[in-house]
Amino acid sequence: MDRKFPFLPKFISTSFGAGFFPWGPGTMGAIVGLLLWLPLLLTHDVIDTLLINAVLVAVFTILGIWSAGVAEKYWGPDPSKVVMDETVGQWIAMLPLCVFASERDPYHTTAFWVFAVISLILFRFFDIFKPLGVRKMEDLPGGVGIMADDILAGIYSAVLLTFSMYLPNIMP
């Protein structure tokens, strides 16, 4: 039996190779998500940015489930090299930035970069410590379990990021 890991699922599951980074591959997967997300801001339109972001999340969730399932056959359960889940989770965590970025010129706004870093910190917190049912998602089988915990971590991060971005404007 040929045990050579096919290129495409390896490339996808490792977020285009970021999973091979020797120190903190999960963090590198999230940083890849952040870096790949930045060109979306060029649309300068909240609907286009949200739509493209949603399509990317959906497509790469499906590809991530598939490729992570394949990766488990070669590297064992929930391998640390599989970081597409972190990339997708980071995209979800950055959803509130789609609206924020459409309201101003994001590349020249200090607040945008601060909130981008906060989204990364929040996402990594939920991904590493796995509170509020995030750890329970890992119990799902195969690639679904690998992706689901990071999707939930991304959702929690997006909610907290939204509060941190907009609550000061709502409070008297």
Image: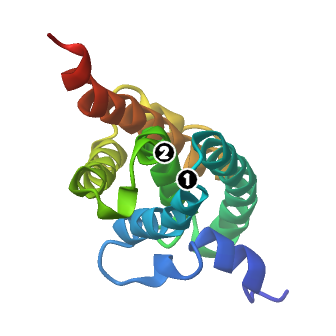
Q: Is 26 on the left-hand or right-hand side of 42?
A: left
Mark 1 in CB contact with mark 2 (< 8 angstroms): yes
Q: Is 110 on the left-hand or right-hand side of 65?
A: left
Vertically, is 83 above or below 138?
below
Give the image location of residue 83, x and y in percent.
51, 65
Label 1 vs 2, first from the N-terminus: 1
Q: Specify few, some or many for label 1: CA neighbours under 10 Å numbering under 14, 14-19, or 20 or more.
A: some
Vertically, is 125 above or below 36?
above
Give the image location of residue 110, x and y in percent.
22, 57
Q: Nearer the viewer, residue 116 or 110?
A: 110
Vertically, is 133 above or below 41?
above
Q: Nearer the viewer, residue 38 or 75?
A: 38
Residue at 24 percent of width and 32 percent of height: 164
Vertically, is 140 above or below 17?
above
Residue at 67 percent of width and 72 percent of height: 12
Numbered circle sitting on residue 44: 1
Name the kind of residue labelled 1 in the image.
His
Residue at 47 percent of width and 32 percent of height: 136
Q: Is 95 on the left-hand or right-hand side of 170?
A: right
Look at the image and tell me in which quarter the N terminus lies. bottom right
Q: Report whether residue 138 is seen.
A: no
Give the image location of residue 37, x and y in percent.
52, 61
